[in-house]
Amino acid sequence: MKKIIPYILIVVALLIAGGIYIDSTSKTADNLKPGGYRQPKKINLADSGKPAQAKLKTGQGETQMPKIDFNKYGAAPNFTGISHWLNGTVAECHFDCNSRISSEKHIQQQSLNSDPLTIEQLKGKVVLIDFWTYSCINCIRTLPYVTKWYDTYQDQGLVVVGVHTPEFAFEKVTDNVATAIKRFKINYPVAQDNDYATWQAYNNHYWPAEYLIDKNGQIVYEHFGEGNYDHTEDAIRILLGMDKPVAKDNGKDLSGIRSPEMYFELPRLTNLAPEQTPSLSPKPYTLPPKLELNKFALEGNWCFDSEKASLCGPGPGKIKLHFSSGKVFMVAAADKPITLKIKVDGSAQPDVAVQMSDLYTLFDSNQYNEHEIEITIPEAGFEAFTFTFG
């Protein structure tokens, strides 16, 4: 997980040392809207320039397929720059499945690679392209719908291709993606787009994003983020020649989430308590007596880099967060198994064991209001990437 810090961070380090920190993400503080999407780095959602999604006119109790005004977005770009094609079939873990080394580097695989696909060879089929990445909570909540569509309509002519475009370096590891494919029961081909080549070919900006391609190879429908699952499924059904709509299903109501996704990486570090400043080298931190809503603070010896904050010095360490939601997740990792002690509003919660780079559930409730969570990390080697909410 250790990386050479990019040259640009040397400049950041000098600015920090001089008491100046330039916030390069001031236009992207709202990285996660309830029921929304995550942005790639340095993309302002409001300035994305993507065409508006087609509106579907449906209602409960309808027996006739709604009229959908499919748009003409042009010919679908081909898959390009794909490092691996995965088909979702991996063997059982023959090592310690909780071991970060085993999980990320040494999983035994069967039929891991599938044959490359092209848009040309898929003509005559209806194709759904799903851009996702495995630690994204928005993608995780969307995947049950995508996998169901594939399982339901593959015999009627639907092809689903997952394009896995990573947000973090650990999501580039093929074994990690293969493990996620198995966990989420994905049976359709997944293209590993580590260099964003296919992402850029589609002028995509979002996780998750769905593109529907008709039998002539033309993109006719786009949907970004969570929700409107019935709309997308009806669009699939119309392209397949079906004449009955599905039941209304917009997905889980996420209106109670009032905290944005929060990053620990230097380029997008906007939610750290104002009393604390990031440091590239190990620095001692003390929790402030009070935290504003949607701010977090650290205790112990921490250091920051271009993707994460790490507990660098001898433990223990702490992270405290003031948030408004019913559920808290963290993308995290550790050099060896580490058990986190969790308290929410002073009450102990179940311990959370962390090792492999993944999304972990820290708090799971239906209490959608303000809370404070305190996470105690017993020793060094822990890495925090993001907080997300549900």
Image: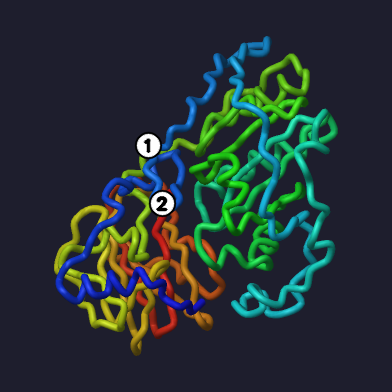
Q: Amino acid at mark 2?
A: Phe
Q: Where does the image place residue 95, in percent across and percent down from the top left?
A: 72, 79
The numbered mark at residue 162 is none
* Within-10-Å neighbours for mark 2: few <14, some 14–19, many 20+: many
Q: Secondary structure at mark 1?
A: helix
Q: Where does the image place residue 349, in percent across and percent down from the top left?
A: 40, 66
Up the image or down, 166 lies above or below 216; here it is below
Residue in the picture at 78% in, 18% down: 241
The numbered mark at residue 47 is 1
Residue depth check, mark 1 versus mark 2: number of the one nearer the observer: 1
Question: Is 4 on the left-hand or right-hand side of 87?
Answer: left
Question: Is 297 on the left-hand or right-hand side of 125?
Answer: left
Q: Quadrant location of residue 17?
A: bottom left
* Within-10-Å neighbours for mark 1: few <14, some 14–19, many 20+: few
Using the numbered discs, state the Cα–Cα distance from disc 1 to disc 2 in whole angstroms.
24 Å
Q: Quadrant location of residue 16?
A: bottom left
Residue in the picture at 26% in, 77% down: 299
Question: How many numbered discs sit on the rendered protein?
Answer: 2
Query: In this orientation, does residue 59 appear?
Result: no
Q: Amino acid at mark 1?
A: Asp
Q: Quadrant location of residue 103?
A: bottom right
Query: In this orientation, does residue 267 appear?
Result: yes
Q: Name the residue that disc number 2 marks.
A: 389
Up the image or down, 277 lies above or below 301; here it is above
Q: Secondary structure at mark 2?
A: strand
Q: Where does the image place residue 198, in percent across and percent down from the top left?
A: 62, 47
